[in-house]
C-alpha cells in the first residue's frame, strides 16, 4: 500500500541532524512507492532542502518565519499543522529529540492522530506498519500496530540506518506561509545561553567516552576528554558524576538523561546502575573500565578492563594515538 510519509527535519545549531536522514531513509522504505516529504521549519533553513532530497524527499515544505528562529511550542505546532494540512501524510516522523518529544504529542493530539514514541525500528507486516520501541528502561521491547488514521512517530537517533545520499537527487520545494502573530504565543524565548560543553553532539555521537563517580573530580574528566579527542568522540557521564558536580547535567546518560546508541561506548568509573544502563545498553560495543571486578557494568560490557582508570585511560590514549597517527 503506497503511503505518504512526512519527515520533520531536526535542526540544531543551523545544521540538520543525522537522525533526519535516518528518518527519511525509513520513510522511503515504508512509503512502498508512495511519496516522501521533508519539512523545514525555522529561519534561514531553506538551504537544507537539497540535503533532504538527497536522502529521499520528493518534496520539501519550507516554512520560513521569524517566530521559528528558536523552538517555541505554539509557533512550531502551528507551522507543522499547516504543513500537514498541505501535504496530507499517512505517517509523520520526528526525531526523538527535545523538540520532537515535545512537538509530536502536541500536534498528534490536536489532529486526533495516533502517536508512538522513541521507535528503534519500523517494519511492514501483513500490510500494516509495526513500530518497535523499548520499554522498562530498555529491558523489553513492544511492537505497536496502528490500525487506522495518521500516525506520528518519534525516532531514536542512531538506530535506523541512513541510506547513502543520492548526489544528483532533487526535490520540489514548496514554500508555505504561516501567520504566527506574537500575541498568539503563550511562551517565547528571551535569550539562549549556550552551554560550554560543546564538542560532539552526544545523542548522535558514534563513539562516547563516559565518566562516573570513579573519576573523582572535574579534573578527573581530563584524561577522558583526551581519549575522546583522540577518537573524535563525545564525552558523557553518569548521574553520579553530574550529582557530584564533576560535570554538567547536559552530559548525563541514562533513564533521566540522554539515551544514546553509539557504535562504541567506553564507560570509565561507572558502576552500571540500571538507570544508567537504560541510556546506553543498546550501544553496539561497550567497553568498561572499573577497578571493581564485581561492578554490574561488566555484565553488559563486550570488553572489560579491571583497573584504575587513571592508569588505564592514559595508556589507551597513547596507544590509540600511535595507531591513529
Ligand atoms: P557509583 O555507583 O558510585 O560507581 C562508581 C564506580 O567507579 C564504582 O563501580 C567504582 O568501582 C568505580 N571506580 C572508583 N574509582 C575508580 C578508579 N580509580 N578507576 C576505575 N573505577 C573506579 N544514573 C545515571 O547514570 N543516569 C540516569 O539517568 C539516572 N537516573 C536516575 C533516576 C532515578 C529515579 C534514580 C533513583 C537514580 C538515577 N540514576 C541515574 C542514579 C543511579 O541509580 C546511580 O546512582 C548512578 O548511575 C551511579 O553513578 P556512578 O556509576 O558514576 O557511581
Image (tube, rainbow, N blue to C red):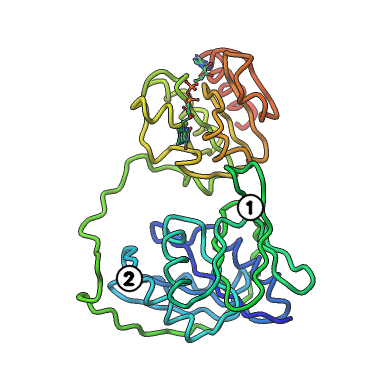
In the rendered view of the protein, which quadrant contains the N terminus?
Answer: bottom right
Estimate how packed mark 2 is, as few (under 14), some (14 to 19) or many (20 or more) residues with alpha carbons within 10 Å.
Answer: many
Q: Residue 212, position in %: x, y?
A: 47, 25
From the viewer's perspective, is residue 37 above or below residue 271?
A: below
From the viewer's perspective, is residue 8 above or below residue 325?
A: below
Residue occupied by mark 2: 74
Residue at 68%, 81% (x, y): give it: 34
Residue occupied by mark 1: 159
Residue at 49%, 67% (x, y): give it: 9
- Outermost residue on the right side: it is 126
Residue at 41%, 18% (x, y): give it: 216
Looking at the image, which is closer to me, 127 or 169? 127
Q: Which of marks 1 and 2 is nearer the N terminus?
A: 2
Residue 18 appears left or right of 140 = left
- Mark 1: is the Cβ under 8 angstroms from ligand 1? no
Q: Residue 55, position in %: x, y?
A: 61, 68
Residue 207 appears left or right of 250 = right
Amino acid at each position: 500500500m503506497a503511503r505518504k510519509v512526512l519527515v520533520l527535519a531536526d535542526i540544531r545549531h543551523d545544521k540538520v541532524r543525522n537522525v533526519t536522514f535516518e528518518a527519511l531513509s525509513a520513510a522511503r522504505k515504508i512509503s512502498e512507492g508512495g511519496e516522501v516529504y521533508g519539512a523545514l521549519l525555522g529561519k534561514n533553513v531553506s538551504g537544507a532542502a537539497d540535503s533532504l532530497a538527497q536522502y529521499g524527499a520528493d518534496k520539501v515544505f519550507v516554512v520560513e518565519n521569524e517566530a521559528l528562529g528558536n523552538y517555541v511550542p505554539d509557533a512550531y505546532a502551528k507551522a507543522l499543522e499547516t504543513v500537514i494540512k498541505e501535504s496530507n501524510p499517512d505517517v509523520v516522523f520526528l526525531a526523538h529529540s527535545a523538540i520532537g518529544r515535545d512537538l509530536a504529542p502536541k500536534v498528534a493530539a490536536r489532529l486526533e492522530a495516533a502517536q508512538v514514541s522513541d521507535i528503534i525500528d519500523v517494519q511492514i507486516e501483513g500490510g500494516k506498519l509495526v513500530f518497535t520501541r523499548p520499554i522498562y528502561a530498555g529491558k523489553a521491547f513492544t511492537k505497536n500496530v496502528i490500525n487506522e488514521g495518521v500516525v506520528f512517530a518519534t525516532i531514536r537517533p542512531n538506530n535506523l540506518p541512513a541510506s547513502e545520499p543520492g548526489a544528483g537527487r532533487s526535490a520540489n520545494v514548496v514554500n508555505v506561509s504561516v501567520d504566527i502573530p506574537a500575541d498568539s504565543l503563550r511562551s517565547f524565548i528571551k535569550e539562549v545561553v549556550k552551554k560550554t560543553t560543546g564538542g560532539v553532539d552526544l545523542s548522535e555521537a558514534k563513539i562516547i567516552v563516559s565518566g562516573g563517580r570513579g573519576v573523582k573530580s572535574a579534573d578527573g574528566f581530563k584524561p577522558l576528554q583526551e581519549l575522546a579527542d583522540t577518537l573524535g568522540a563525545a564525552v558523557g557521564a553518569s548521574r553520579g558524576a553530574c550529582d557530584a558536580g564533576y560535570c554538567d547535567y547536559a552530559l548525563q546518560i541514562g533513564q533521566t538523561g540522554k539515551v544514546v546508541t553509539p557504535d562504541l561506548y567506553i564507560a570509565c568509573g561507572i558502576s552500571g546502575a540500571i538507570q544508567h544502563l537504560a541510556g546506553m545498553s543498546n550501544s553496539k560495543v561497550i567497553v568498561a573500565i572499573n577497578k571493581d571486578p564485581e561492578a554490574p557494568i561488566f555484565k553488559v560490557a563486550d570488553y572489560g578492563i579491571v583497573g584504575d582508570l587513571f592508569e588505564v585511560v592514559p595508556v589507551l590514549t597513547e596507544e590509540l594515538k600511535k595507531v591513529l597517527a
